Image: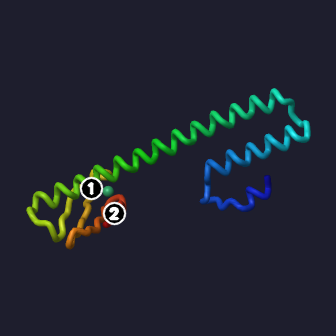
């Protein structure tokens, strides 16, 4: 297991690697008869349940990120709609932190940043 741990950076935390490490450990324990088949089957069920929970959490975080992005871009779009112009600069309230956000639009592309939470987006 040290092989895998050594290759993992602290900030490169990945649920797939954790699951893989647990499965390899389980396989070795079973191969060396350190645990019974029943213990291995039970541990495998726990690993699968943990994996499912991690995936659910990742999906939820992704969904939250998409909702934040949509709310932010809607606020930006509304700010531009109020000015009645396609290009230019607008200020608006960030829906994520209620800080001041700024957006620049030019020829269909845009750049926006919130001075409160640091959210940025561009196209
Ligand atoms: Zn913000």
Residue for badge 2: 121
Q: Distance between the Cα atoms at labels 1 and 2? A: 9 Å
Where residue 22 sits, quadrant-wise, is top right
Are the residues flagged by discs 1 and 2 in contact, CB closer than 8 Å? yes
Label 1: state its secondary structure: helix
**Which numbered marker is on residue 73?**
1
Ligand 1 is within 8 Å of the C-beta of the residue at disc 2 = no
Where residue 122 sits, quadrant-wise, is bottom left
Percent x, y of residue 32: 91, 41
Residue drawn at x 74%, y 56% is 5
**Which numbered marker is on residue 2?**
none
Image height of 55 relative to 104, above or below? above
Viewer can see residue 10:
yes
Ligand 1 is within 8 Å of the C-beta of the residue at disc 1 = no
Label 2: state its secondary structure: strand
> Quick check: which quadrant has ligand 1?
bottom left
Residue drawn at x 89%, y 37% is 34
Percent x, y of residue 93: 23, 55
Percent x, y of residue 86: 14, 66
Residue drawn at x 65%, y 36% is 48
């Amino acid at each position: 297991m040290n092989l895998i741990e050594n290759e993992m950076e602290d900030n490169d935390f990945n649920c797939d690697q954790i699951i893989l490490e647990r499965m390899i450990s389980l396989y070795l324990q079973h191969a060396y008869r350190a645990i019974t088949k029943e213990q291995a089957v039970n541990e495998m069920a726990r690993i699968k349940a943990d994996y499912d929970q991690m995936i659910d959490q990742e999906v939820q975080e992704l969904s939250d990120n998409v909702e934040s992005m949509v709310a932010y871009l809607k606020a930006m779009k509304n700010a531009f709609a109020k000015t009645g112009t396609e290009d230019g600069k607008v200020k608006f309230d960030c829906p994520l932190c209620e800080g001041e956000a700024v957006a620049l639009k030019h020829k269909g592309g845009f750049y926006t940043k919130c001075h409160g939470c640091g959210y940025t987006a561009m196209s």
